[in-house]
């Protein structure tokens, strides 16, 4: 007679950085966790992204989620191994003109009040700390404590820590559907006390009422050029590019990695699941980068790839209980903020599952808000 394995308390669909963070915090509370992923851990949106940990301020809810998440990442980074490649040189938000410079002063009060170390740099100060930038730029908003990490390394570490507490991981196991306390996979049914849909850009396939649109992006990585650029550098126009659901946009974004390589972005396209490299968009993205940092044009690029950000209509992720299926929870729809907000998402979800008060207001992230939205016109 065979003895069946005890069912997990929580089954997490998706072993990207969000699912891994959920496993880390839930297992830390003593819950038995199992993760299932259609590929290998971190192989979806997580693998295609940039590991920038920043406090974004497009809305109050986003600001708080990012703030809490980045504080948590900073705590965790003290224990992370070298393969997570954590650096903490900060981030520069570059003003392209005097009009954008005028937008910086109001930001200082908000960030300072939240305990975030910021400074406005003038043109001379900016040129001194990042000399490869185009001469004559008016200044920048300097977030001094922003971190960069290698997101696949961080995902691996979170999973290792969860597994050390009894969690388990099934890779290369596509989930076909989610039911009340179970999932159906290509190889059979898995039962659990509850299920978390953390499938990123693919979460809507399993919970069709969610509104998540894949938003393609391109990234380029260079060969090794140590100290060419010391810290993450982005244009303020990135915020507009990131938060408006236009069919196509590009913005300047360069991230130095611990390896000495530079990652160059960013682009956004609404083209469904078309994974192909759009040479026209790629050229626009690189031209934009060269405008801000001309020396990039002389560097050797070794790889280009695309990935899909899971975008929601109101630009906030879904975090919480899904009432239309018993024992189903959602942690998905983070657009380009999944890596930086993974820890905050997991903290909030853990508090909700355990029925305790959270330091973060859950209301703006409640998945049920989608039920009150009008259906998009055909």
Image (cartoon, rainbow, N blue to C red):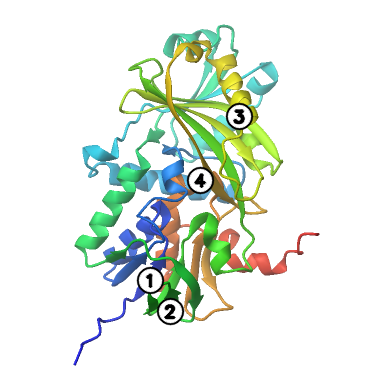
Label 4 sits on residue: 337
Q: Nearer the viewer, residue 127 or 174?
A: 174
| Residue 311, position as x, y percentages in the image | 60, 51
Circles 4 and 3 in contact, beta carbons < 8 Å: no
Label 1 sits on residue: 11
**Under tag 2, what secondary structure?**
strand
Q: How much space separates mark 2 and mark 4, taking CA atoms?
A: 28 Å
Label 2 sits on residue: 182
Q: How much space separates mark 2 and mark 1, taking CA atoms?
A: 8 Å
Q: Quadrant of residue 285?
A: top right
Q: Earlier in the sequence, mark 2 or mark 4?
A: 2
Q: How much space separates mark 3 and mark 1, taking CA atoms?
A: 40 Å
Label 3 sits on residue: 279
| Residue 139, position as x, y percentages in the image | 56, 16
| Residue 69, position as x, y percentages in the image | 42, 48
| Residue 32, position as x, y percentages in the image | 28, 72
Q: How much space separates mark 1 and mark 4, taking CA atoms?
A: 23 Å
Q: Nearer the viewer, residue 240 or 46?
A: 46
């Amino acid at each position: 007679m065979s003895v069946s394995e005890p069912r997990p308390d929580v089954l997490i669909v998706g072993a990207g950085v969000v699912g891994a963070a959920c496993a880390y915090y839930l297992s830390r509370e003593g819950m038995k966790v199992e993760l299932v992923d259609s590929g290998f851990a971190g192989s979806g949106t997580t693998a295609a992204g940039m590991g920038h940990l920043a406090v974004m301020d497009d809305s109050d809810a986003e600001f708080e989620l990012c703030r809490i998440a980045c504080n948590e990442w900073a705590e965790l980074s003290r224990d992370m191994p070298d393969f997570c490649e954590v650096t903490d040189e900060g981030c520069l938000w570059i003003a392209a003109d005097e009009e954008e410079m005028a937008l910086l002063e109001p930001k200082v009060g908000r960030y300072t009040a939240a305990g975030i170390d910021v400074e406005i740099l003038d043109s001379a100060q900016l040129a001194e700390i990042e000399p490869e930038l185009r001469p004559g730029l008016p200044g920048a908003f300097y977030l001094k404590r922003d971190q960069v990490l290698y997101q696949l390394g961080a995902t691996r570490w979170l999973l290792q820590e969860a597994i050390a507490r009894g969690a388990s991981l099934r890779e290369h196991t596509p989930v076909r559907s989610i039911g009340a306390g179970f999932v159906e996979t290509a190889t059979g049914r898995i039962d659990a006390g509850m299920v978390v849909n953390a499938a990123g850009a693919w979460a809507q396939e399993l919970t069709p009422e969610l509104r998540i649109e894949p938003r393609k992006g391109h990234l380029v990585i260079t060969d090794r050029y140590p100290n060419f650029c010391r810290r993450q550098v982005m244009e303020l126009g990135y915020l507009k590019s990131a938060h408006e659901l236009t069919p196509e946009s590009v913005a300047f974004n360069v991230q130095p990695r611990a390896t000495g390589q530079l990652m160059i972005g960013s682009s956004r396209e609404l083209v469904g699941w078309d994974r192909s490299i759009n040479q026209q968009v790629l050229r626009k993205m690189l031209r934009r980068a060269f405008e801000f940092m001309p020396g990039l044009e002389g560097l050797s690029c070794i790889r280009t790839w695309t990935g899909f950000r899971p975008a929601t209509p109101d630009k906030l992720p879904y975090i919480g209980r899904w009432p239309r299926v018993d024992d189903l929870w959602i942690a998905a729809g983070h657009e380009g903020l999944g890596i930086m907000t993974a820890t905050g998402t997991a903290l909030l979800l853990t508090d909700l599952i355990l029925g305790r008060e959270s330091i973060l207001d859950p209301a703006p992230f409640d998945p049920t808000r989608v039920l009150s939205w009008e259906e998009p016109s055909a």
